[in-house]
Amino acid sequence: MGIHPYTIGYGLILTVSVYCIAVWVNGKIPSLLTSPMILSILMVGSVLIGFKFPYEDYYEGGKLISWFLGPAVISLAVPIKKNVAVLIKFKKAIFLGTFVGSLTAILSNFWLFYAAGFPPSLVYSIVPKHVTTPIAMELSKIMGGDPSITVGITFFTGIFGFLTVGYFLDRFSIKDPISRGLVIGVSYHGLGAVRAMEEGELTGAIGSIAFIITGTITSFLTPILLIWFKTIL
């Protein structure tokens, strides 16, 4: 079988073109709802479904962009370095906040969906939804969840936080950039860190470090708490 003509370069061209359009739209109508990230997802999905292009072919052409995810995450270290003095000054508050936030997220995710009567495999798939996708997937496997469900739930969590966290923080009059960064980074992983960056360099730095520490703490706490979860489910 030959290679589809649109396979090579198709994904790259489509993704870049859609993103440029999304940036233009956001410039004309600035809003979280017109965020290039949100619009790009909707537009690419619409094209793939509308023209019945296989996702595998799209990804084959666009995986070069996926490769940049690594450097993009590493770039989050820039605002951290610029605000290292502040991070050191508030290190205890940051660590305590991320620890309590991680523990609360794990327990609330478990109890909420357990109380709702969800089957064990689905509960375990949802428990790590507040951390970045690669970590969430591995934790889901360890607990006996379905990693494919975990990916979807984790992605939805990030999108939901990206769109709504600012409103809720303002609603509860949380103005301090360190507090806002901690809430966003602990609750909404990588997308949260991006959202925090939009609020300012200090909030972005706190959000980035919180998202990193939360993933680390959750990786240690979840297997320990799993022993207890197994006695309940």
Image: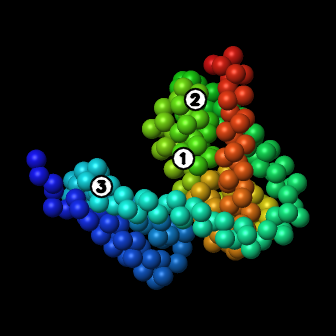
Q: Which mark is residue 60?
A: 3
Note whether residue 161 is visible.
Answer: no
Query: Residue at the spot x=73%, y=43% of the render?
Result: 217
- Seen as rendered, the residue at the extreme bottom is 28
The reply to whether residue 84 is in sight is yes
* Quadrant holding the C terminus: top right
Q: Is residue 147 above or below residue 209?
A: above
Which badge, 3 or 2, comes first in the chain's sequence? 3
- Would you name the residue on which mark 1 appears? 133
Write down the residue under mark 2.
142
Identify which residue is drawn at 25% across, 64% down: 10
SS at circle 1: helix
- Give percent across and percent down for residue 228: 72, 22
The answer to whether the residues at label 1 and label 3 have Cβ atoms under 8 Å apart is no
- The residue at the point 54 percent across, 45 percent down is 134
Which image quarter: residue 194?
bottom right
Mark 1 residue crowding within 10 angstroms, few (<14) / some (14–19) / many (20+)? many
Q: Residue furthest left?
A: 1
Q: Which mark is residue 167?
A: none
- Describe the element under mark 2 as helix, strand or loop: helix
Q: Position of residue 128 (x, y in %)?
A: 61, 39
Q: Which tag, 2 or 1, sits closer to the chain's start? A: 1
Q: Is residue 108 above or below residue 67?
A: above
Residue 125 screen position, x and y as percent: 54, 34
